[in-house]
Image: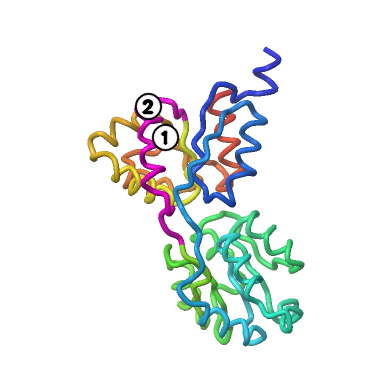
Amino acid sequence: MINSVLQPLAGLTVLVTRAQHQAQPIMDRLRALGAEPVSMPMIDILPPESWEALDQALSQITDYDWVVFASTNSVNSFWHRLPKSTEHQSNSEKLKFAAIGPSTRAAVEKHGAQVTYQAEEYVAEGFIAGFPEIKDLSGKRILWPKTNIGRLLIVEQLRKAGATVDVVQCYRTALPRNADTIAVRLLELLQRRRIDVVLLASAQTATNLRAILNLVARELEIRELIAHTLLLAIGPETAQAAKTHLFKCDLQAAEYTIDGMIDTLLKRYS
């Protein structure tokens, strides 16, 4: 009884699909709650094909009114490339930072900057709904460092409101380089029904999971393999990707964060 209270996820094997450099915190928390986490990255974070566009934007950073961040990876790439000679300019009174969620906000603050706006709902629609002066952004210049994939609703709506938006690639996502090895190991675990829960922290992760399974199984077999495994999505976009590529989504986090996913697991298995 005491153990079930201290370790409410005891006996649960959870597949963590985040990129390798992002997996450790969630694995540590899962272990503390009694679960057995299995790290199997379904996504690789790579530099952009060229830094030219980002470097050009950073050289003119004081020309911008806002920088929009939709992920911690974009935050880290931004400050990694920001020239030391102009780093102090990122703290100018004119330049403001916007973050789509709390983890992205924390990444910005880690670099000594303040976030002026964070969305109340951590999806593109929620971000736009509350963006300051969204009804009229005429004359405003906005920089959006982002990945090579993903929805463009944010930039479309910002431009519709009158802003000039520069979208620059600051990192790329791809299948893991050892995708073949991961596919074989994943197939074995699913065949033996050793995975109870799969955590999907992005739509691209769901897409890549299917691509990796395609290396070792056909569609009908994939349906059968995941039939006994619970798929937990971080938010609605990821849930839709899971339904499209993995045929189902069993749970969606109430709060669209990693902590929200853990809380959803605790409610499900308490």
The location of residue 16, given as percent across then percent down, is 52, 40
Task: Identify the residue at horizontal 59%, vertical 30% (top origin).
Answer: 266
The range drawn in magenta is: 173-196
From this view, report whether residue 156 is shown above or below residue 213. below
Separation (CA) of disc 2 from disc 1 = 11 Å
Nearer to us in this view, 229 or 154:
229
Mark 2 sits on what residue? 228
First along the sequence among labels 2 and 1: 2
Q: Is residue 240 visible?
A: no
Nearer to us in this view, 250 or 221:
221
The reply to whether the magenta stretch includes residue 185 is yes
Nearer to us in this view, 152 or 79:
79
Of tags 2 and 1, the one toward the viewer is: 2
Mark 1 sits on what residue? 250
Where residue 260 sits, quadrant-wise, is: top right
Residue 190 disc label: none
From this view, report whether residue 97 is shown above or below residue 22. below
Q: Give the structural element (helix, strand or loop) at label 1.
A: loop
Where residue 57 sits, quadrant-wise, is: bottom right
Q: How many marks?
A: 2
Where residue 217 sits, quadrant-wise, is: top left
The location of residue 249, given as percent across then percent down, is 39, 39
Task: Identify the residue at horizontal 29%, vertical 40% (top origin).
Answer: 216
